[in-house]
Image (cartoon, rainbow, N blue to C red):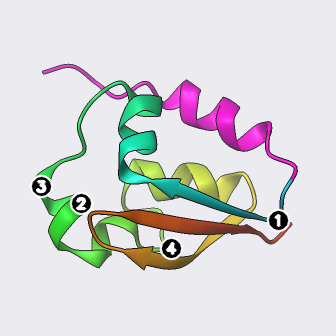
């Protein structure tokens, strides 16, 4: 099983200038170079603002917080630091 390319997500977030960033599921999968698991489409907990999953851990460590999520469509991150 191949791993996600987290560096692409890190670089993407580090290069943002807007406070709020809308990322579609399609964009996220392109950044990660792999499809998200079915649970990301079904359960809000997959993108919870905690460090139990790798993807939210990345945005939290870079100073972002998820402020909106539409399952299967997009999420919005806000720069808090």
For the residue pair 57 and 24, the one nearer the viewer reads as: 24
Disc 1 on helix, strand or loop? loop
Gap between marks 3 and 4 measured at Cα: 19 Å
Front-most of residues 15 and 61: 15
Say few, some or many: other residues with alpha carbon within 10 Å of mark 2 (under 14 / 14 to 19 / 20 or more): some
On the image, which quarter does residue 32 sit in?
Answer: top left
Q: Of tags 3 and 4, which is closer to the observer?
A: 3
Please report the residue visible at 34 percent of the width from the left and 63 percent of the height from the top.
Answer: 73
What is the crowding at mark 3: few (fewer than 14 residues within 10 Å), some, or many (at least 20)? few
Asked whether residue 49 is drawn in magenta, I would say no
Q: Earlier in the sequence, mark 4 or mark 2?
A: 2
What residue is shown with label 4?
A: 49
Residue identified by numbered label 2: 40
User: Which residue is depicted at the point 12% across and 55% down?
Assistant: 38
Q: Is 35 on the left or on the right of 20, as rendered?
A: left
On residue 37, which mark appears?
none
For mark 3, give the secondary structure.
helix
Instruction: Check disc 3 and report the residue beneath it.
Output: 38
Q: Which residues are magenta?
A: 1-17
Q: Please tell me which of labels 2 and 1 falls first in the chain.
A: 1
The reply to whether dot 2 and dot 1 touch (C-beta < 8 Å) is no
Q: Position of residue 74 (x, y in %)?
A: 43, 63
Q: Position of residue 34 (x, y in %)?
A: 28, 29
Question: Which residue is denoted by mark 1 in the rendering?
Answer: 19
């Amino acid at each position: 099983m191949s791993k996600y390319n987290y560096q692409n997500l890190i670089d993407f977030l580090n290069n943002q200038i807007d406070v709020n960033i809308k990322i579609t599921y399609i964009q996220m999968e392109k950044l990660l170079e792999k499809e998200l698991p079915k649970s990301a489409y079904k359960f809000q907990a997959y993108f919870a603002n905690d460090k139990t999953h790798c993807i939210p851990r990345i945005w939290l460590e870079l100073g972002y917080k998820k402020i909106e999520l539409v399952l299967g469509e997009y999420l919005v991150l806000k720069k808090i630091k």
